[in-house]
Amino acid sequence: MIKLGNTINALISCRMALFVGIIMLTQMTCFFKNYGESPVFESIDDYKGVVGGSLAIPISATDPEGESISYRYVIQIDNLDTRAAITYRNDGTALFQWNPIASDVGQWYIDFFASDGENETSVRVLVAIYSTIGGGTPVFRKPIGDGISFDLNQNDCLTIPVNAEDSNSICIALNEVSPALANTTFNKEEDQVRQCPIGQGEWIWCPSAIQSKQIESHLLRLTASDSMSPPTTKDYLIVLRGERSPNDDPSNDDPLLEEPSSDNTCQGTAPVITHLPVDQVTNNPLTIKATISDDKGLSRNPLLYYSLTPPAATPVLSTMTQLSMSPLSGTRLSAEWKAIIPNPVANSPAGTTSTVYYIIVADDRDSTNAQCNHTSYSPQFGYHSIFVIHPQITRAQGICEPCTTDRQCGGDKDLCVNIALNQRSYCLKHCFSSGDCPQRYTCSTGTISSVNRKSERQCLPDYGTCQENNGTGTVSCQDDQFEENDNQQQATMLTPGTQSALIVCPSDEDWYKITITNPSFLSMTINGDQLADLDAELVNQNGEILQSDTDIFSDIEIQSCLKADSYFLRVFANSFGERTATRYSIQYNIEDSTCDASNE
């Protein structure tokens, strides 16, 4: 007979054993969970960024157990969260975006962390932030102006001298942003002792007969790099005028380019330019304004050509300096435009005089038939001229106002400094500390070089750019989630449908890859901001341009019959003016087609 006490003791022992077993099982479960495998980072290279630019670093990690991953970062910069953030992509990866300001200049370590909720791993990345103001990055000395007019009736080939300088380096590599235009050569000089390029060369283009008929302008985008800092970009607009002789041998024509449409229906009227020349008494840059309208819209920004010597009775535009005019107000159909000409008497004694000669040119594109398009000149014949006098009493340009020489700025130590992001010069203010600077400006840690090669500490706009109208620096541009897709090798795969919330920054590009599995007809629409100047090109794997739309508008249509292959869409924005973000969307579809794709 079992005693009651023994039974109770047995029950207690069983319950305790069960309790201990549960505890041990729980501890084992916690053990395996806490000490499971950590996420694994994909390697991240070191990065370089510039003040006023947008730095985008893709970050990606995988979890061996397939759990979702969250990311965070640690960096020893105060308040970086106000200008940097991590955004998540649909594929589980993320993008770290940073808009550096003047106080961020230097080298920094960023520790990125990936967590699956229980385990965390990290990777360290070195990021160098540069200022593009007054040295530290290459500066283009040639070509001057914003572009050139190339008269096909006068020459078969265009030669453009290129020269870039850097206060910190002798070795400077020059390149043309791909895809390069067909029939071009870029000759670059090298230092034989150092065995490196020295930032000098000649870019040569000999347009084919078909190119001369079909392409009205080409945006040449040059870069100069010293290998230490991010490259500097120079945009140069080549405008073709006239036609090659019908006797020219077309045997070397680019087979990818078709003859222009035979549309014989001409509609629309020529642009109307309203301008009154006004003599100026000033030592500051000369502002030329004009109101220009067109019933269908201009094909590009109006152009101003100027010279300090009298042009021929029938002016030759290719011998004059070309400037792209910027909009002041209005719409794309009617607006006030301006151009800024360097003052020829800025460095001369008071009372010195000079004459500036100039022509304003506006083009439209009313039809696919080139004969239906219009070019308007102001004046219609000859040229305008204004008389410029250096005054007895000069007005100094304030901080972030345009300049061409130190003498136009305030005190003796206030300098006229090149801002390399847009290759323009602005007055800055001397300082000993940031307390000497206006709000949203930071005193440079070292001296800044001026256009006259003087060096002083200066108040730098926090976001690396000057806005001429209000003299303040602002965040210029923050790229979208598909960065880095700045070249053909980094192109993002594009699938049929609509992709919105896209952003392209000036002096930057967005590339997308399109795969065609059967001969198909591609139809694509790209819509940008209302007043943006958005451009696009469809190219093949060799970088050859199949179609392009580079007019002044931001509404782009591309329709093409394509054979089975991979193609690339290049989207970029005009950067002749101040840096701004251009927002856009892409909608496209492909349909199997029996259309003739043999020439693509």
Image: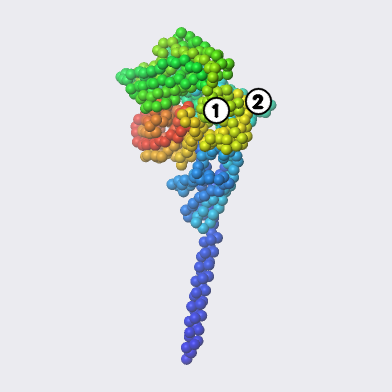
Q: Which residue is drawn at 54% across and 38% down?
A: 101
Q: Residue at x 51, y 69 (%)?
A: 25
Determine the CA span between mark 2 and mark 1: 34 Å
Q: Residue 241 appears in which quarter of the rendering?
A: top left
Percent position (x, y) of residue 373?
36, 19
Percent position (x, y) of residue 503?
44, 37
Residue 509 visible, this angle: no
Residue that protrudes farthest toward the right in the picture: 193
Amino acid type, residue under disc 2 in the picture: Asp
- SS at mark 2 in the image: strand
Residue that carries the numbered disc 1 in the rendered image: 427
Q: Which residue is drawn at 38% across and 18% down?
A: 273
Q: Residue at x 49, y 13 (%)?
A: 387
Going by the image, does 364 lie left or right of 408?
A: left
Going by the image, does 173 lie left or right of 574?
A: right
**Relative to 59, does residue 393 appear above or below in the rendering?**
above
Residue that protrudes farthest toward the top in the picture: 313
**Relative to 171, does residue 303 appear above or below in the rendering?**
above
Q: Which colour scheme is used?
A: rainbow
Looking at the image, is mark 2 or mark 1 earlier in the sequence? 2
Percent position (x, y) of residue 245?
44, 13
Q: Residues within 10 Å of mark 2 (few under 14, many from 20)?
A: few
Amino acid type, residue under disc 1 in the picture: Cys
**Relative to 568, does residue 23 appear above or below in the rendering?**
below
Q: Are marks 2 and 1 in contact (CB under 8 Å)?
A: no
Residue that protrudes farthest toward the front in the picture: 393
- SS at mark 1 in the image: strand
Residue that carries the numbered disc 2 in the rendered image: 191
